[in-house]
Image (cartoon, helix red, strand yellow):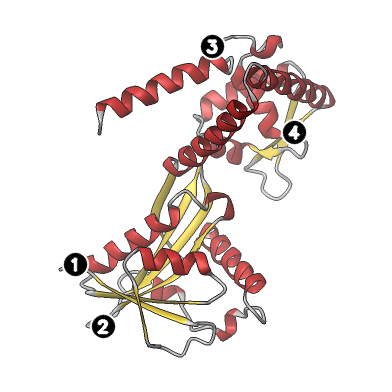
């Protein structure tokens, strides 16, 4: 890793923590640190499960419990067993907590305006655009890609979201019953595998590959959550699927796609795939691609 890049990241972190008020033990002069204020914001008007909160914020369970206890003692939150699963606790804002969250929102808007205020219009535009780019790249750096069981609930969520999107984008819709199958056993070793991408424990994308003895491997179920598009996650998934295919002896990788997915077509072409004739009878395919793996 480039030492200069590491130094630049550390300098950026120092500037941001100071400018955002993270160094103060009374964030926005409300008598509690930034971490407690962030919890109020994340809990939100609808409340949330403590387990989901911990995963979303990457917090140690003991540390999160202490912060929630402090907020409970202040009368800002209340926790109860989850109605569907008594082993899970749900935390919600009290009326006092909702008022405090609204005040924090108001003060946070003022703080953001104070950052933008001294800048010219062009500087504001540049800063906001740079912040959006940093946010996307930080999200990309937080992605974890692992081999998962196709029947895992998060894998199922990704595949269902993928099917729903195809149904909304394809001419005439999409019916999973009419597409070529990619059953669980075909996406589980030794016949294949399923990759699941997550960000802070939340599903963010997926991809799968079928291994074919003495035949090209087939990539299936490539999908990236809309919020993660533009972060390079699709290429990361594709690259890892190719690596798994090569590790299992495949010298050629194939895939097919629909003309309604121009971003997918662009990804495959820039990743080295070339268009070939139809190699299957997938009813929803308009383009068939193939890539020869390095020896």
- Image location (x, y in percent) of residue 243: 27, 62
- Quadrant in the picture for the N terminus: top left
Q: What secondary structure is marked by label 3?
A: loop
| Quarter residue 174 falls in | bottom right
Q: Which labelled disc corresponds to residue 215? A: 2
Q: Position of residue 235 (x, y in %)?
A: 39, 57
Packing grade of label 2 (10 A; few <14, some 14-19, many >=20) is few
Q: CA distance from mark 3 to mark 1?
A: 51 Å
Residue extending furthest toward the bottom? 281
Location of mark 3 (residue): 23
Whichever of callouts 2 and 3 sits on the residue coming sooner in the sequence is 3
The crowd level at tag 3 (other Cα within 10 Å; few <14, some 14-19, many 20+) is: few
Reading the image, the residue beneath label 4 is 92
**Residue 234, percent across and down?**
44, 58
Query: Viewed as shown, does residue 124 lie left or right of 268?
Result: right
Relative vertical location of residue 85 with respect to residue 181 in this rendering, above or below: above
């Amino acid at each position: 890793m480039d030492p200069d890049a590491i130094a630049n990241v550390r300098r950026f972190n120092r500037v941001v923590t100071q400018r955002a008020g993270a160094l103060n033990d009374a964030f926005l002069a409300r008598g509690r640190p930034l971490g407690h204020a962030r919890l109020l914001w994340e809990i939100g008007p609808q409340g949330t499960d403590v387990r989901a909160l911990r995963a979303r914020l990457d917090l140690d369970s003991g540390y999160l419990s202490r912060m929630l206890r402090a907020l409970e003692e202040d009368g800002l939150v209340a926790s109860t067993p989850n109605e569907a699963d008594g082993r899970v606790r749900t935390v919600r804002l009290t009326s006092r907590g909702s008022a405090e969250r609204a005040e924090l929102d108001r003060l946070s808007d003022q703080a953001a305006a104070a950052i933008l205020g001294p800048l010219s219009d062009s500087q504001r535009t540049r800063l906001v655009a740079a912040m959006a780019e940093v946010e996307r790249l930080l999200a990309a750096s937080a992605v974890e890609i692992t081999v998962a069981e196709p029947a895992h609930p998060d894998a199922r969520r990704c595949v269902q979201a993928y099917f729903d999107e195809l149904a909304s984008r394809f001419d005439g819709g999409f019916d999973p019953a009419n597409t070529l199958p990619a059953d669980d056993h075909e996406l589980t070793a030794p016949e294949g595998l399923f990759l699941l991408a997550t960000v802070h424990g939340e599903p963010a994308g997926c991809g799968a590959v079928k291994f074919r003895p003495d035949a090209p491997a087939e990539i299936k179920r490539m999908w990236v959550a809309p919020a993660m598009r533009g972060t390079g996650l699709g290429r990361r998934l594709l690259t890892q699927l190719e690596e798994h295919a090569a590790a299992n002896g495949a010298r050629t990788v194939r895939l097919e796609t629909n003309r309604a997915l121009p971003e997918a077509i662009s990804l495959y072409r820039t990743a080295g795939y070339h268009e070939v004739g139809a190699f299957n009878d997938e009813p929803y395919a308009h383009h068939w691609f193939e890539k020869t793996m390095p020896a």
